Amino acid sequence: MKKLLLLLMLVVVLPSCKTTEANYKAAYDRAREQKEATTPLDSTIYARIRQEALRDSRDFIDENLVVVTERVKVTADQGVETRPLEQYNVMVAQFKQLFNAKSMRDRLREAGFADAMVVETAEPLYYVVAGVAPTEGDVSALVKRLRKQSAVAIRDPFPQVLKPIR
């Protein structure tokens, strides 16, 4: 009788102990949240750099664009003249590789965007700026011109506006 009772308990209890993908995911999420709570994001220099960048959305006349406020510098490139950054600069792409950023900058220049340049963050990430815009009206006009241009494909989430921290 005891054996039968024990067998019956095992038949009822064991199937409920089965692990599932949902159980694994819940345990993983709990562990990740606990780790993030105990490990501040500032544990790496890149995390501090990313946190320093401010992202906001703003209307520029008839364009609603993301505005990124970040510490950047114009990438040095021999033989390429660049204007200084203005209050507003229209970004069209972001790359980890400088070669890719320069390639897109060159395509923009060939398409008639003479102020196109590459700027870099401390991480480094390379932003391709299609042009500088001292006023909000200039931002709107430049974005309209970019959207009409088919020579260079601009993918979401771009274009964005870069406001350099000085």
Image: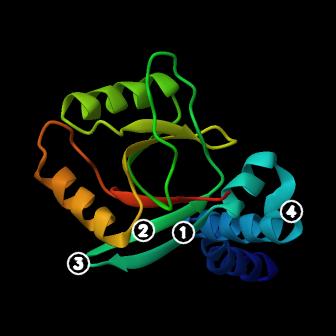
Count numbered badges in the picture.
4
| Image x and y of residue 118, in percent | 47, 36
140 displayed left or right of 89: left
Q: Is residue 25 above or below residue 152?
A: below
Of badges 3 and 1, nearer the viewer stands: 3
Q: Which residue is mark 2?
A: 66
Q: Looking at the figure, which quarter contains the N terminus?
A: bottom right
- Numbered disc 3: secondary structure: loop
Looking at the image, which is closer to me, 104 or 34?
Answer: 104
Q: Which residue is mark 4?
A: 39
CB within 8 Å, label 1 to label 2: yes
Q: Which residue is mark 1?
A: 55
Q: What residue is at 26 percent from the left and 47 percent from the top? A: 154
Q: Looking at the figure, which quarter contains the C terminus?
A: bottom right
Q: Residues within 10 Å of mark 4 (few under 14, many from 20)?
A: few
User: Sequence order check: which comes first, mark 1 or mark 2?
Assistant: 1
135 displayed left or right of 37: left
**Whether residue 19 is visible:** no
Q: Is residue 55 above or below residue 147?
A: below
Q: Residue furthest top?
A: 79
Q: Which residue is mark 3?
A: 62
The three-letter code of the residue at mark 3 reads Asp
